[in-house]
Each structure stands twice: as C-alpha cells, then as structure tokens.
Amino acid sequence: MAALARWCVRHRLLAVLLWLLTLGATATAAALAGSAYSTDYEVPGTESGRATELLARGFPGVVGDGGTIVWHTENGTVRAADVERTMTRTLDEVAELPAVAVVAGPYGEGPAQADRISADGRTAYATVTFDRPVGDLTAADARSVVDTAARAAGDGLRVELGGSAVALTEPRGGLLAETVGVAVAAVVLFLVFGSLAASLLPIATALVSVGTAYAGTVLLGHAMTVADFAPMLGMLIGLGVGIDYALFVVTRHRQGLRRGLPVGKAVEEAVATTGRAVVFAGATVCIALLGMLVLRLGFLDGVAIAASLTVVLTVAASVTLLPALLSWIGPRALGRRERRRLAEQGPEPETGTPPQGLAARWAAFVERHPKKLGVLALAAVTVLALPTLSLHLGTSDQGNNPESATTRQAYDLLAEGFGAGVNGSLTLVGEVHGAADRAALAELAEAVRGTEDVASVSPVTYAPDGDTALLTVVPESAPQSERTSDLVDRLRTEVLPRAEQGTALDLHVGGVTAGYDDFAALIVGKLPLFVGVVVALGCVLLLLAFRSIGIPLKAAAMNVLAVAGAFGVVVAVFQWGWGSDLLGLGRAGPIEPFLPVIMVSVLFGLSMDYQVFLVSRMYEEWLATRDNRRAVRVGLAETSRVINSAAVIMIAVFLAFVLTGDRVIAMFGIALAAAVALDAFVLRTLLVPALMHLLGSANWWLPRSLDRLLPRISIERPRQPVAPGDGRARIPGRRGECRSARAGADA
C-alpha cells in the first residue's frame, strides 16, 4: 500500500488523468450501447414461471409489455357520440405511432369490447401493446403515446394512462437526490475538517468512482440480467461508502500533517494504515453483497455484481485517486487556523494526550452505567423492530404511486369503475390434449366463477394450434392484497386439482400476484442459508482480525438487531403508511420480496466498517494495557466522533434518495438510513461498549489451540518499533492513529 501511495503522489497528474479517462470511456460506451435493464421478476421453474412460458408459446400477443389508456366522463357516459368520436380518433392516432403494435378499445361489437366499459358507463379503457419490451423502449416512445392520448382530455373528459411503459415518462428526482445528498455531505465534511479543499476531495473521489460504476452497470446489463433499480441502488451505496472511505483517509492524512510530516509522507502513511482498513472494509461489503449468489437467482445475481463493482471502484479511488488529489492540495488539507497553529506552536506530539471533550465524557458515562444504558439501547431497538413481525412481502404496483402521477390516477379510475382486481388479473394456463380436457375446462370456468373472491372469469380461449388454453380471472381484491394471494393459493390447492382429476390437464396460475408470491416464497425459503453464509464469513474475518470469540458473536448479534430495527421502520412507513404521504411516497402497500436479501447484504457490509473501526482501537489499547475498562473507554472516546460524522454523511445521502420518487429506491434509502442511524448512534456507541464493559476480559478470549491454528492478519500496517532503550513500545493505531504506551503501563 505504501508503494502504491508513493506512485500516486509522484505521478499525481497521470493518476488523475487515468481515472478521468476511465470515467469518460465507460460513460461514452454506456451512452452508445444504451440500457438493457430487466423488470422481469419471474423465476423459471415456479408455477407462475411455467404459466408465462405456456403463454409466450401459445399466445405471444398476450405476453408482453403494454399500457392502458383510461378515460372517464363526469357528465353522461363514454358511449355518448362526442366521447366515442373523440376517443376513437385518439386511439387510431396512438395505433399509428412507431412503437405501438396493437390498440384494443371498447368500441365495437363483441363481449370483449363491452367488458372494457364500466357498469355505470362512465369509465372505459383501451389496451396498448408495444412492439418491443419496456426495457427496449425509449422515454420518447412512451411520451408520444402519453401526449397523443392526453390531447383528448377536456370538456368534462378525463384521460389517464397506466402501465410500465407510461411510468418511463413520469419525473424522477434522481439528480435532485444526488445533489441534496452530496450538498449535505459537503457541509458535514466542512464542519469536520474546517477546510474547503479537504471537504471537497471525498466528494470528488466518490463522484468519479460512482460515475464510472454507473456506466459500468449500464454495460453489464448487456452481458447479464440486471434489475432496473440496480444502477440507482449502486449509486446510493457508492456515494455513501465512497464519501465515508475518503473521509477516513483524509482524517488520517490531516493527523500526519498536524504531527509535522511532509505532505508526501503524510499521504503515504494514511494510505498504508487507513487505506488498508478501507480495503478490508470494502472487501467485507463485497463479500456480503456477493453472498446473494448462493441464492442462484439470475435477477439478484446482476444486482449483487453491479453493487460490488461500485464498492470495488470506490475503494480503488480512495487509495489511488484520493492520494493524488491530497498531494495536489498540499497543506491546504488543514484549515487556516490549523496551519497557523502548526506554524506557531509546532507539530503535535505523536504520543497524543488522553481523550478530552464530549466524546470522552460520554465514554466515561457508559463505563459508569453499562447495565442501565445497555438495557435502554436494547429496548429502543426492540421497539423499532416490533413492526417487523407484521412484515408482508408482495408486489407494490402503480396504486402505490403518488396521487399526482397519471399512472396512479389510471389505476384508481380502473379500480373504481371495474373493481380493484382488474389492475392485476390472474391467468390460468394449461396444455390441452383432447376432448376430455376441453370438457373439463368448460366446467372449470364455472367452478372458478363460484370461488370466493373471484369477480369475473373470461370464457376459455384456445391458442391457434389448439394445444394451449387460457382463462383470465379477475379477483375482487387488488393485486397486492393478501386476499388475492389467498385466492392464488385456493386455486392452486383446491380448485385446479379437482378440475384436473381424470384428465391430462396440467394447469398453472400466473399473473402479477402469483409471480411475486412465488418469488417471495423462493427467497424466504433460501433466506436462512443466505444469512448463515454471510454471517459466517463475517465472523471468520473478525475472528482472524481480533483473535477473539466474543467480538465476532457480538458483531453478528448487532447486525441482526440493526436489520430488524431497519425493517421495523420500513414496515411502519411503507406497509402501515406512517408518514408515507408526507414524504411523497404514495399509498401504503407490501414490501418488495427482494428487499430482505439485498438489505441484509448491504447492511452487514456497512456495519462491519463501524465494527472494525471501533473495536480495532479498543483492541489496540487492550494489547497495550490488558485493561478492558480502559480499552473500551479510550476506544469509544477516540473513534465515536469519526463514526458519528461518517454516519451523518451516510444518513444524509441515503435519505436524499427518497426524493427520486421511486418507491423501491426510497425503500432502500429509508431502510439504510435507519440502519446506519441505529448502528452508529445506538449499537456501536452505546450497546457494544456497554456489553464489552460487562463482559470484561472475556471479550478477548480465544482458546490457545485455536490461536495457534489461525493465520494472523493485520488490518493496518504495524508500526516499526522505536529504538531500544527508551522504555516505550510503539503500537499500531486504528485508522492511522499512532499511540505509544509505556511498557506494561496500566497493566
């Protein structure tokens, strides 16, 4: 690491240019290639996945991406001559647009057309089928449909549009979220450093690395399945950890300058010490993210690799680009007052002084009241985690969008005119092998009509080759309702098995709700394995770093508490709707089924950083003094300020992404912000030190036989010992803090 730092300092212009060229090249390639993200959460091998395969083979026009044009009249009916004339002309214009394949409206003869007009005659809709998947559509393609349809509105006629393609045209606050998050981070950094130059470097480093990663994720989408929210998720994680990692390196560099080190030497020491810790922390985040690969779900594999790519690039920028920039600004990494004090009073002593200030007083307070404070912290986390017990995994849809969105307006008009279930119908699909199967299907349609929570059932439709049959079932409840999920189970376990008896039929239930239910069931089934693998790997890393059984176990427990508390906040805001309208997050609904897996990965990796930062300073003091109380007190006093500053930056960045208007990204932002707040302000600075005071020297116990077997690793480069004879031993410092302790002092 020291050699890398020296190279970056000596060739700082080349190092900066290489990063800028990499950013420019990847951004250009991404712009030329375009995006190829996936919105398909279907899992092959599940029943809903089999239904989709049969539909695609027998009814290629049914499966695909489309939109819905909904119109409603306050006076009269949609069958009025002027309304019919206006909408017929509009639908014909939409059908002529380049990206549109078919438009099916309500006007004409036949039951299919009549079903598109509500019972009161005041609402009607038409379906728009595009000639390509939504992932291949441009915003301009969707915008042309929206603008053409919207021109029909007026004189008491409302026109709204729904569907995944239409959602492409709705404004997203991505740039606003990034700007707000970065601005708050800049303010916090300036307050911490007191230097404008030093506060801008972590932000510049994070922006370059995250920008490169964003473009890389776009390109990755052409090589494998990458979810449509993966780029924004990667940006959210990258900005948070990138600014934090750079904060740690700059903090260590400034300490070196205050001790009188030349700029180049201070940069080298910062990278050789704190840079090693940053690499270790980034590796733990990547390990946690790549743990998603054990689930063997292509949809999540792309998310894991894209997020890991972002973390790798932020770490690389922190130990290459940042050192070059630090050497460029020279002594200006210190504020004017610090430079003046250094010139007048000389360098600070390397040995340092006992911790002072609020952090030291807090550490002493925790030392005096570990039981009371530990119980208080545990109670607070438990209260926040209680809503997790009612966690409902399912699909959120356009009914959860903000009320101002046209997709939400279309959703509500359809629900009011045709029933909530029309927004997410179910499909019964199966292969047909003879007359007996056809007779059974006719009876099945009647049986399904009489099933609880079914609003309507379409007649049996046969594919052109006659080998595949389709029934469309409209539930009485909304797609995200638990009643709809219960209906899916009822059809699969009761209705369809009775219809299949004595026939060759093999029927499958598909549709939005069925697909999400299958996806959720698959993830929940594999979640214990995933959590076990991630926790085990983290415990092994901490065991090697701190030579202790208790430290890894406490870290695992803290991670579980942080995840539980974060999920409690997510359930309260998004599922129960507490404050969701105030935050502009739309109507309450279920939690996305993939959220638990991704959240566990990200939170475990992020919390490991704080764990390593806090405990390694305690471990250093323990090795010097063998006094657990002193080790915990000093470690907490000397690290809590940086932990809290880093946490405030992360929280600001994560919360800013609520402004994107994307429900999934907002869910991640609030969950991560809640988890970091709990981790930094409750767990690491209160519960962990309280427990360590109560456990005493047992914190550092490791069986001798295991100690001999384990390899030894060092998170930071050990210091060279001072010349013999001065009676003092140099101890490697956490985050580059070098402390000396008299041999055997306070033992």
Image: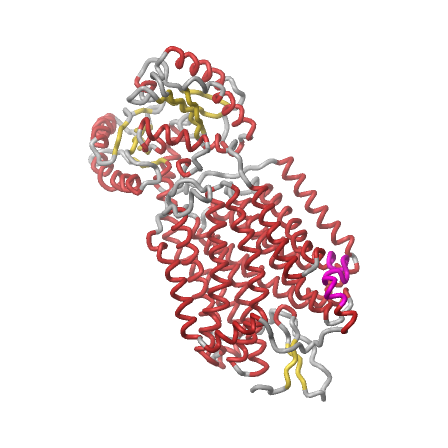
In this orientation, does residue 429 appear?
Answer: no
Q: Does 474 lie within the magenta span?
A: no
Residue 339 image point, x, y percent: 75, 65
Examine the rendered structure and indicate whether residue 264 appears above or below residue 47: below
- Residue 231 x, y percent position in the rendering: 55, 44
Up/down of 422 relative to 368, above or below: above
- What residue is rendered at 44% in x and 76% in y? 369
- Magenta region, main secondary structure: helix
Q: Quadrant of the C terminus?
A: bottom right
- Residue 79, given in percent of the width and then of the height, sits at 35, 14
Q: Toward which corner of the image does residue 492 lie, by quadrant? A: top left
Residue at horizontal 53 percent and vertical 51 percent from the top: 654
**Which image quadrant is residue 742 in?**
bottom right
Image quadrant of residue 638? Answer: bottom right
Q: Is residue 308 visible?
A: yes
**Quadrant in which the N terminus is drawn:** bottom right
- Number of marks in the image? 0
Q: Position of residue 206 (x, y in %)?
A: 64, 52
**Residue 331 in magenta?**
yes
Q: Which residues are magenta?
A: 324-340
Seen in the image, is 322 located left or right of residue 163? right
* Lateral position of residue 407 relative to residue 309, left or right: left
Left or right: 497, with 290 as reference point: left
Coloration mode: secondary structure
